[in-house]
Image: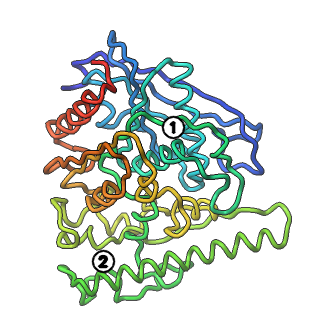
Amino acid sequence: MSDAAVDIQVEWIPLSYPEKRTFNETYGFGGSQGMVHVEAMLLRPKDRPSKTLFFFMHPQTSMDVLPVPRSLVRLGCHVMCARNRYFKNDSVLIFEKVLLDFGAWIRHAKEELGYEKIVIVGWSGGGPLAVFYQSQAENPTITDTPNGDPVDIVGAGLIPGDALIFQAASVSRARILVEALDPSVVDESDPDRRDPRYDLYDPANPMQPPYSAGFVADYRSAQLARMRRITSWVKDKLAMFRDRGGNEVERGFVVHRTMADPRYIDPTVEPSERKPNWCLSGIPETVNTGPVGFARFCTLRSWLSQWSIDDSRADATECARHLGVPFLAIENSADDGAPPAHMREVFAACASPDKQYHTIQGANHYYAGQPELLDQASGITLDFLRKRKLIDF
């Protein structure tokens, strides 16, 4: 069903709330005046009231024009696509602070907009964020960031969602990065200095698909080693700033060549129905060095909170162990963005006594050109919620 077949009402909602900080990370959305400014789009079918809100948030972008939220609205749902303070600028993102923005929106939806039930939908990159939020809303433990900066999640009074949909999502941004990081880079300041053994895109490399299990294991170890070298450098810089005092407390940097997951090239590595020589951002070799590769632009603190496999807390596998609400996982079997293996790992870890897993055969990440598969996924979601009396239509 197209948007034209349903009269969708779209309302822009601004939200501001106070926050104390020691320095600014973003321009405008988290300003020096002590206020955080965020925005959301509320999408509703005309003349279809509801007491249930489907809530979406992504770490860096808005989802109001993307297929999954629009599909739910066409089926009669009220949907909020909220933006956090790092909208379109994840180079400085601190996940712990995103939880505060997430929680401010959930509270606004309940107390100001009057919704009685909140269904959190963690689609795509919003998946690990959704699970991170819900786990801290149910069992708050965090009082600082991985760098030790204060962020009082325990005292924030986060309101839990009533159910969580984990759809076409990954374990974490850190896991996605460590599995895509190009281990051929031997000098972070000069990406042209590379170890040819690990350069997947060098036609002269004798290691060509299908890759042996031994090569993949060696490659994965080299990826982890590169990530940990970056993390060590980051921690050394932060320690340097602390030790010498003064007002210089943060630094930006570039991470080169970050889209070189063997899965992109060789479909026999964790076989699925995904398209070979492709990733959700395009041709892997091009994205590997382009401006939209994972973690291309970073700050020291953001690296620890968002990208470091040893430090980031936004890990859906670990966070899912603390969930108690109904949990629905929807895997797309031809996903070119979120590895199905990640979906299965998170589902296995989920502690909720009420959980279900469904696979949409042949579906790609965005359901591009697949409206019938998108409708199938949305239908599964609504059926799951109806049986638990979490929607009112």
State the image coordinates of residue 139 (x, y, percent, origin top left).
Answer: 54, 47
The residue positioned 33% from the left and 46% from the top of the image is 353
Viewport quadrant of the C terminus: top left
Q: How many discs mark residues in the rendered view?
A: 2
| Quadrant position of residue 162 | top left
Would you place residue 178 above or below residue 390 in this image? below
Residue 236 against residue 335 in the figure, above or below:
below
Considering the image in quadrants, where does the N terminus appear?
A: top left
Residue 79's x, y, as percent?
Answer: 39, 27
Q: Position of residue 286 (x, y in %)?
A: 34, 66
Q: Residue furthest top?
A: 47
Element under disc 2? loop
What kind of residue is marked 1? Arg
Label number found at residue 201: 2
Q: Which residue is mark 1?
A: 83
Q: Is residue 282 visible?
A: no
Around disc 2, counting alpha carbons within 10 Å, would you say few (fewer than 14), some (14 to 19), or many (20 or more)?
Answer: some
Residue at (35, 71) in percent of width and height: 260
Disc 2 versus disc 1: distance between alpha carbons?
A: 36 Å
Dot 2 and dot 1 residues touching (CB under 8 Å): no
Q: x, y (%) of residue 339?
A: 29, 60
Location of residue 270 by image quarter: bottom left
Q: Is residue 312 left or right of residue 150?
A: left
- Residue in front for this viewpoint, 344 or 41: 344
